[in-house]
Image: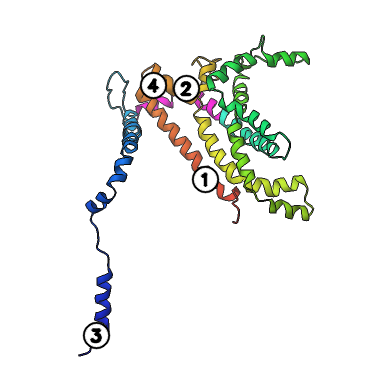
């Protein structure tokens, strides 16, 4: 009797089909991996997930650390939009971000290109430019408070020698934020190192081909170097925006937490900290934290969406 080839193929297919494992079988296979990852998982849940979701709830309450508080709905958010100091801190933070982030990219790329030259002793120069990033922010603030002192500071002293009367710097409402931007630019060595890595990743073949075509330095910089460096610029742009909106240590140390003069150095995170840990308005501070989160996420999303137009990757 002849066998049906269709039935034989079907039976063979059934025989080679792997046995489906249930959930408990899979867990038993990965139990040692889960066991080793358990300290990190517990840390993530206890120190990140629980505080994160708790802050969402607290932002709708009058929670003050000392007392559980009452649920008040959107009242904290409404009060924030009628708080003049809140808007002042928003303005100061946006002012710092708008000026510091582009300047840090411009100066960072320029320094990286200079430090990428094949010059004797370049390792020493790279070390010198990176050293400021190793200085703690508190020590950095104390150093610059002396340098920018209007009476006996080194900066005004140098300006006086050439006949220029220096401003009050940190004591002036007009010059306080530019002074802070200057201090922050002094520590862009970490970004410079990242730019250097990006420059080192650009193949020399592009420059050799440009030399054959008779391109000058300007043309090679704007048609080869900068376009191929845009992925690194993109990364530093996102990190710079996030870091600028979270500016805290320098202005807090410079003003002893007061934001003087005239609240010109009261930044968003400083005001958030004051509400949470000075005035014990933790619900109010939680609302501020979530507004900051939404702002940073929105700006980051805009950068990611627009990056398709100006970020160029090799081979694409």
- Residue picked out by circle 3: 4
Q: Which mark is residue 223?
A: none
Q: Earlier in the sequence, mark 3 or mark 2?
A: 3
Q: Over which residues does the magenta segment extend?
A: 74-94
Instruction: Identify the residue shown where x is 27% and y is 22%.
Output: 68
Majority secondary structure of the magenta segment?
A: helix
Query: Would residue 270 be found to the left or right of residue 282 on screen?
Result: right
Where is residue 139? Give x, y as percent.
Answer: 55, 18
Q: Is residue 263 above or below residue 226?
A: above
Query: Would residue 175 be found to the left or right of residue 268 on screen?
Result: right
Which image quarter is the C terminus in?
A: bottom right
- Residue picked out by circle 2: 270
Q: Earlier in the sequence, mark 1 or mark 3?
A: 3
Would residue 90 be counted in the magenta stretch?
yes
Residue 285 appearing in the image: yes
Q: CA distance from mark 3 to mark 4?
A: 79 Å
Instruction: Identify the residue shown where x is 28% and y is 78%.
Output: 9
- Residue picked out by circle 4: 276
> Which of the 4 image quadrants contains residue 127?
top right
Q: Which mark is residue 304?
A: 1
Where is residue 16? Give x, y as percent.
Answer: 28, 70
Q: CA distance from mark 3 to mark 2?
A: 80 Å
């Amino acid at each position: 009797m002849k066998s049906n080839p269709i039935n034989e193929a079907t039976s063979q297919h059934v025989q080679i089909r792997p046995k489906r494992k249930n959930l408990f079988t899979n867990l038993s296979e990965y139990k040692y991996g889960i066991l080793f990852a358990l300290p990190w998982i517990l840390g993530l849940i206890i120190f990140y997930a629980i505080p994160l979701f708790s802050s969402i709830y607290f932002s709708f309450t009058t929670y003050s650390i000392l007392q559980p508080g009452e649920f008040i709905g959107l009242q904290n958010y409404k009060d924030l939009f009628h708080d003049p100091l809140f808007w002042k801190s928003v303005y100061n933070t946006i002012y710092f971000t708008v000026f510091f982030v582009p300047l840090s990219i411009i100066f960072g790329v320029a320094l990286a290109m200079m430090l990428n030259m094949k010059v004797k002793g370049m390792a020493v120069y790279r070390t010198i430019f990176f050293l400021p990033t190793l200085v703690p922010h508190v020590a950095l603030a104390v150093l610059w408070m002396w340098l920018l002192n209007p009476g006996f500071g080194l900066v005004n002293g140098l300006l006086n020698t050439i006949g220029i009367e220096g401003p009050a710097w940190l004591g002036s409402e007009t010059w306080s934020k530019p002074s802070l931007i200057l201090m922050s630019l002094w520590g862009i060595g970490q970004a410079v190192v990242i730019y250097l890595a990006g420059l080192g990743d650009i193949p020399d073949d592009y420059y050799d081909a440009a030399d054959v075509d008779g391109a000058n330095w300007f043309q090679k910089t704007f048609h080869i170097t900068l376009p191929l460096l845009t992925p690194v610029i993109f990364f530093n742009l996102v990190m710079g925006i996030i870091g600028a909106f979270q500016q805290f240590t320098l202005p807090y140390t410079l003003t002893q937490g007061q934001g003087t003069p005239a609240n010109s150095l009261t930044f968003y995170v400083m005001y958030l900290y004051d509400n949470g840990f000075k005035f014990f308005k933790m619900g109010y501070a939680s609302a501020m934290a979530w507004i900051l989160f939404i702002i940073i996420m929105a700006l980051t999303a805009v950068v990611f969406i627009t990056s398709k137009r100006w970020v160029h990757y090799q081979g694409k």
